[in-house]
Image (cartoon, grey):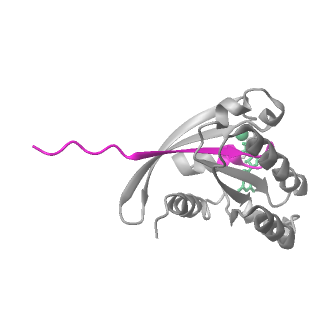
Amino acid sequence: TAAAPTAAKEIRVAFVGEPSVGKTSLIRRLCYDEFSRQYVATVGADFYMKRISLPGRKEVTLKLTDVGGLELRGSMIDKYLFNADMIILVYDITNPTSFDYMSNWLAIVLGLLESAPFFAVIGNKCDLEHQRAVRLDKTNQFVADHNLISLLASAKTGESVDACIVDLISRHLGLP
Ligand code: GDP
Ligand code: MG
């Protein structure tokens, strides 16, 4: 008889950032390979699961938390984030405010958690590069100041979404 399959490692990933930057869209692209133009604000938080294969055929189960944008000011935020292994800060490359607010998110998350989880930044909507309003030198500075990993993606076209996640999880696990 075959040996029982070993349970895949679980990694908890929380997506945070200002409303409408595309957190829900990135997660839905990743989990269901779909995109909607309609904007439905996330209230509270939503939870998703996704199994992914990493280089070397290693499988992991991602538990994704989509934290509603307004939770920054709310009292539930610590419950959504306290056991996250990785926090992905999302901004919209066409929206400078969404970029500026990432430092607030970073400060809040660090203030809530005892140990700093792995942080990454995703600049979403890179299909709108011609409308870019966040200067690259600003992103580079922020990333350097806080020692973060920063990547670009588009939930709309799907560009780099899977690759970003595989890259970030691999780094988190220290895979080559
Ligand atoms: P959230 O509030 O951060 O969860 O943002 P949503 O995922 O709900 O997306 C907000 C709006 O931006 C929606 O109208 C989406 O269709 C749109 N959107 C999300 N991702 C992209 C993207 O990569 N490119 C473009 N052009 N629009 C996007
Ligand atoms: Mg949302």
Say whether residue 11 is magenta.
yes
The residue lying furthest to the bottom in this view is: 137
Give x and y (percent) for residue 105: 79, 46
Residue drawn at (21%, 42%) of the image: 4
Give x and y (percent) for residue 124: 73, 58
Say whether residue 18 is magenta.
yes
Q: Is residue 16 above or below residue 170?
A: above
Q: Is residue 38 above or below residue 150?
A: above
Give x and y (percent) for residue 38: 73, 41
Quadrant location of residue 95? bottom right
Q: Which residues are magenta?
A: 1-25
Q: Is residue 105 above or below residue 72?
A: below
Residue drawn at (53%, 46%) of the image: 31
The residue lying furthest to the front in this view is: 114
Q: Is residue 33 visible?
A: no
Q: Nearer the viewer, residue 24 or 168?
A: 168
Q: Nearer the viewer, residue 95 or 101?
A: 101
